[in-house]
Image: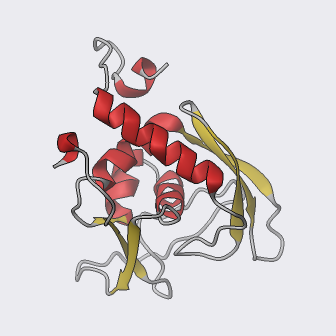
């Protein structure tokens, strides 16, 4: 199952190491145990985690904006695993890094929202780096952000792992 999530097309299947597998399994258990609704660190609305598996994490998104329907959102397990591995390194991880990892502004924002809920992850709000793009973030009906940056009225959020570290992530 994890091979198709890690290997690029045409590349041999990569096997994640045992420490990453255990850390990911603990993450999935933590996500399943979260009481809802969860509040994302940026944006408006809330979400409940419907289920979390190696294949995907599915949430029920309840937007706070008028005219936007509640809906199910699926975040691929491979992206969640990769974002968790990045976060567990201990260095600050911002939304831009998660957007780059996910190759999608909307998926990057969902990774930020999910990981910000996990015990041991510190959420810091501050000023964005000095390089700022001109266009604001706009959300489409499917929850994907159109632009690749944080809206001017939203905080710049960084995640920092403060929990125990595995030998593999040290």
Query: Which sits in the foreground, 143 or 159?
Result: 159
Pinpoint residue 85: horizontal percent, then vertical percent.
32, 45
Task: State the image quarter where residue 141 is shown.
Answer: bottom right
Would you say 84 lies left or right of 166 here? right
Pinpoint residue 84: horizontal percent, then vertical percent.
38, 49
Query: Which sits in the foreground, 135 or 27?
Result: 27
Tell how many labels.
Answer: 0
Pinpoint residue 10: horizontal percent, then vertical percent.
32, 12
Pinpoint residue 116: horizontal percent, then vertical percent.
48, 66
Q: Is residue 114 at least partly visible in the picture?
A: yes
Would you say 168 lies left or right of 24 here? left
Residue at 66% x, 60% y is 140
On screen, residue 97 above or below 21: below
Query: Which sits in the foreground, 142 or 79?
Result: 79
Q: Is residue 79 at least partly visible in the picture?
A: no
- The image's colour scheme reads secondary structure
Residue at 30% x, 56% y is 164
On screen, residue 108 above or below 20: below
Residue at 20% x, 40% y is 168
Residue at 38% x, 42% y is 23
Would you say 37 lies left or right of 57 here? right
Would you say 130 lies left or right of 51 here? left
């Amino acid at each position: 199952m994890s091979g198709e999530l890690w290997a690029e097309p045409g590349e041999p299947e990569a096997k994640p190491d045992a420490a990453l597998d255990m850390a990911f399994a603990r993450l999935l258990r933590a996500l399943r145990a979260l009481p809802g609704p969860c509040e994302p660190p940026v944006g408006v609305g809330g979400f409940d985690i419907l289920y979390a598996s190696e294949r995907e994490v599915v949430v029920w998104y309840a937007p706070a904006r008028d005219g936007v329907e509640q809906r199910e959102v699926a975040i691929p397990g491979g992206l969640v695993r990769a974002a968790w591995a990045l976060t567990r390194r201990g260095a600050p991880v911002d939304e831009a890094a998660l957007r780059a990892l996910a190759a999608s502004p909307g998926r990057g924002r969902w990774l930020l929202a999910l990981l910000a809920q996990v015990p041991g992850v510190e959420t810091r709000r501050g000023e964005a780096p000095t390089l700022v793009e001109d266009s604001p973030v706009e959300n489409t009906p499917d929850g994907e952000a159109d632009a690749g940056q944080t809206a001017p009225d939203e905080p710049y959020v960084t995640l920092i792992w403060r929990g125990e570290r595995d030998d593999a992530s040290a």
